[in-house]
Image (cartoon, rainbow, N blue to C red):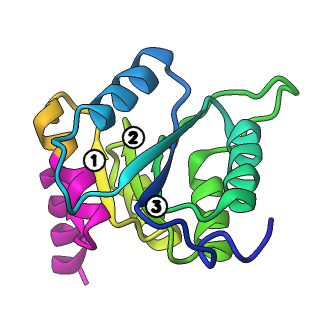
Amino acid sequence: MKNNLTDKSLENCNNILIVEDNQLLLDAIEMMIKLLPVKDSLPTFQIQKAFDYEKAMVKILEISNQGHLNTVILDINLGKSKKGERKSGRELGVLIRKHAPKTKIIVFTSHSDALEINAILKGINPEGFLIKDGSTDHNMFQEVILNVINGETYYSDAVLKIIQNKTRNK
């Protein structure tokens, strides 16, 4: 992977990669981005999609050749690739963080156990973190995307509770 994923500049364009192995969710996330309120200050979006680790790596390299990768919406459980290998979104997130540290990562996962969440926080340190627990509606999801794109951090209540419990237990 090249080190210049976020070094090149495409004005008024926000390259977003959605990595999700569930087709319905993948399409829904894409639609939520396309339905974001149009504002003059908001850049246009170039949306790319990947179903697994390998396809995500290909998309990342393609995007790096065109410009830079601004934001990744990342599922952690990516299923098996065509080669039968199982690589997680957490591994992908760590690679993105290492080679493209300016890329903003929003984790959207069904994992809700404290050990996994703490591992994701430690390994990826995402700018956004949502749990697929039914408490996230499309308005909140859109708000999280906009907040992260604008440089803010957003963690769902479930993630914040785990962080607070970890802090208390130290």
**N-terminal-most mark, 3 or 1:** 3
* Residue 169 visible to the viewer: yes
Q: Secondary structure at mark 3?
A: helix
Q: Amino acid at mark 3?
A: Ile
Left/right of residue 7 with respect to residue 109 in the rendered view: right
Query: Circle 3 sits on which residue?
Result: 120
Question: What is the C-alpha distance between the residues marked 3 and 2?
Answer: 10 Å
Q: Amino acid at mark 2?
A: Thr
Query: How many numbered markers are drawn?
Result: 3
Q: Secondary structure at mark 1?
A: strand
Q: Secondary structure at mark 2?
A: strand
Residue 115: name its quadrant.
bottom left
Name of the residue lying farthest toward the bottom: 170
- Extent of the magenta region: 143-170
Quadrant in the picture for the C terminus: bottom left
* Residue 152 forms part of the magenta stretch: yes
Query: Circle 1 sits on which residue?
Result: 130
Q: Amino acid at mark 1?
A: Leu
